[in-house]
Amino acid sequence: MKTLLAVIIGALAFQTQAAITIDASRVIYSGKDKSASLKINNRSSKNYIVQTWLDTGPETPAAAYPLWPRRPWSNYAPSNRHNCALFTQEPVFLPTGKVCFG
């Protein structure tokens, strides 16, 4: 009985719930558009500040990447959905007729 109680208490101690959830882990960007976005959901009853950045990997310097977040730091109100926008000021020349996975 003590073992069962210890297992239940241990399982409850490690239970976590995410306050901020993101609808996608990847964003599909069309080269003809100037922006792309993804939905961020604050499921908590508290405000959260979220930092957004793009990781280009160890091979590509971040300055060479054509997209960046519109607001790198954003305040997300409780129980609301928000758009996180990525944009470019220059035309982005992506390969055509190919699928790129990142």
Image (spheres, grey):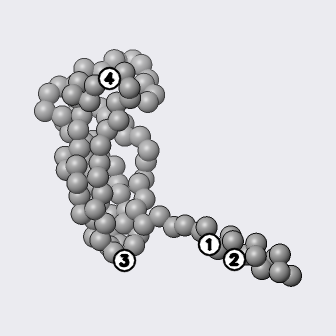
**Which residue, given by chain and number where applicable, does mark 2 sit on?**
9
Cβ atoms under marks 3 and 1 closer than 8 Å: no
Task: Check disc 2 and give the amino acid type.
Answer: Ile
Which is nearer the eye, 5 or 36?
5
**Which residue, given by chain and number where applicable, does mark 1 sit on?**
13
N-terminal of the two: label 4 or label 3?
3
Residue depicted at 31% across the width and 38% down the height: 54
Task: Check disc 1 and give the amino acid type.
Answer: Ala
Any mark on residue 60, and which? 4
Instruction: Indicate whether 63 appears above or below 73.
Output: above
Q: Seen in the image, is 100 located left or right of residue 62?
A: right
Question: Which callout, 4 or 1, points to the residue nearer the camera?
Answer: 1
Instruction: Indicate whether 15 appears above or below 45.
Output: above
Task: Check disc 4 and give the amino acid type.
Answer: Thr
On the image, the x and y values in percent for residue 26 come to: 41, 40
Q: Distance between the residues labelled 2 and 3?
A: 26 Å
Residue 56 occupies quadrant: top left
Residue depicted at 69% across the width and 71% down the height: 10
Residue 100 occupies quadrant: top left
On the image, the x and y values in percent for residue 81 come to: 33, 64
Q: Give the SS element for disc 4.
A: loop
Q: Residues within 10 Å of mark 4 (few under 14, many from 20)?
A: few
Q: Residues within 10 Å of mark 2 (few under 14, many from 20)?
A: few
Any mark on residue 45, and which? 3
N-terminal of the two: label 3 or label 1?
1
Question: Which callout, 4 or 2, points to the residue nearer the camera?
Answer: 2
Q: How crowded is mark 3: few (under 14 residues within 10 Å), some or many (20 or more)?
A: few
On the image, the x and y values in percent for residue 89 come to: 13, 33
Question: Which callout, 2 or 3, points to the residue nearer the camera?
Answer: 2
